[in-house]
Image: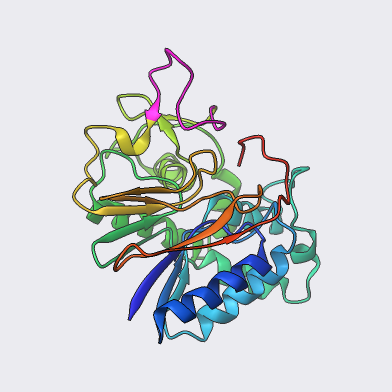
Amino acid sequence: MKTYAIGDLQGCAHEAQLLLECIREHAKGDARILFVGDLINRGPDSLTALRRMKALSEASDGRVEALLGNHDLHLIAVAVGAQRTSRSDTLDAILAAPDRDGLIDWLRRRPLALFVDAHLLVHAGVAPQWDAAQTMALAGEVEAVLRGDGWIDFLRQMYGNEPNRWDDSLAGIDRLRCIVNALTRMRLCQPDGSMDFQHKESENGPEGSGLVPWFDLPQRRTQDVTVVFGHWSALGLVLRPNLVGLDSGCVWGGKLTAVCLDDRSLLQVDCPEYREHRGKK
């Protein structure tokens, strides 16, 4: 059974359906399909995208899974009053849907990281101090909170840019926030691994800033596995021996991308420009 990873949907339900049909034809049988997060928001049909992904996952016997991205967490937080909507959100249909509670409950139980056949899948990035085993363990800490009784209180405290550098001694909400920020928000880092959340519009930081993509830090401990991620539309498709970046800007008029992790086959569908691209996500 072949395994496919799919980049950020962001509510592009029609394109997702086209890509799934391409995967079925390419796989010539059952396939494992893994979405790297941001199923919803910014695109034209977040409600349909979320409903379809939930139905696919529940009917798949574990063969279809989706990671939590920053937009997915934002929806969950908005739904419980822990966060306000923004002008760029396209979440109203979900928030008004009769099955809203079931959709939110399914979404908050999704993983923050997956390890499949020597591939580590996350939405945004991995702190350079973590190896694959620690990444999975730390993701599990946050998953346990989101699936537990205190999940709403956690969401009320989740947002913030500090601490911006991982330390094993971190505890409480600081620890959980740092994990979430690395796995769902990180793009650029200082050489010491401190995360920067200000610069989003290019694949590099401003000249002289010292900022580099998280995956180019020489001390990164996940270089012995292949990391698969999304989140960074300004970066676009990345295919390296130990790195697969899948956010090819579907909602911005780019493509929705899937990569077969077994042989690196590339499957893509073109997307209309649903939102004017300013490099931001």
Q: What residue appears at the point 29 percent right and 68 percent down from the top-left corner?
A: 262
46 or 29: which is nearer to us?
29
Q: What residue appears at the point 49 percent right and 42 percent down from the top-left corner?
A: 185
Q: Position of residue 253 (x, y in %)?
A: 66, 49
Q: Left or right: where does residue 193 sit relative to residue 34? A: left
Magenta extent: 199-212
221 or 145: which is nearer to us?
221
Colouring rule applied to residues: rainbow
186 or 165: which is nearer to us?
186
Please tell me how many numbered marks the rendered image carries: 0
> Which residue lies most toward the top here?
208
Q: Which quadrant of the rendered structure holds the N terminus?
A: bottom left
Q: Which quadrant of the rendered structure holds the C terminus?
A: top right
Q: Main secondary structure of the magenta part?
A: loop
> Which residue lies most toward the left here?
224
Q: Position of residue 29 (x, y in %)?
A: 40, 87
Q: Left or right: where does residue 212 sit relative to residue 202? A: left
Quadrant of residue 215 within the rendered picture: top left
Q: What residue appears at the point 51 percent right and 50 percent down from the top-left corner?
A: 247
Q: Is residue 238 above or below residue 268?
A: above
Q: Position of residue 24 (x, y in %)?
A: 48, 80
Q: Is residue 221 above or below residue 13?
A: above
Query: Can residue 167 be found in the magenta stretch?
Result: no
Quadrant of residue 63 within the rendered picture: bottom left
Query: Can residue 209 be found in the magenta stretch?
Result: yes
Q: Position of residue 191 (x, y in %)?
A: 31, 24
271 or 154: which is nearer to us?
271
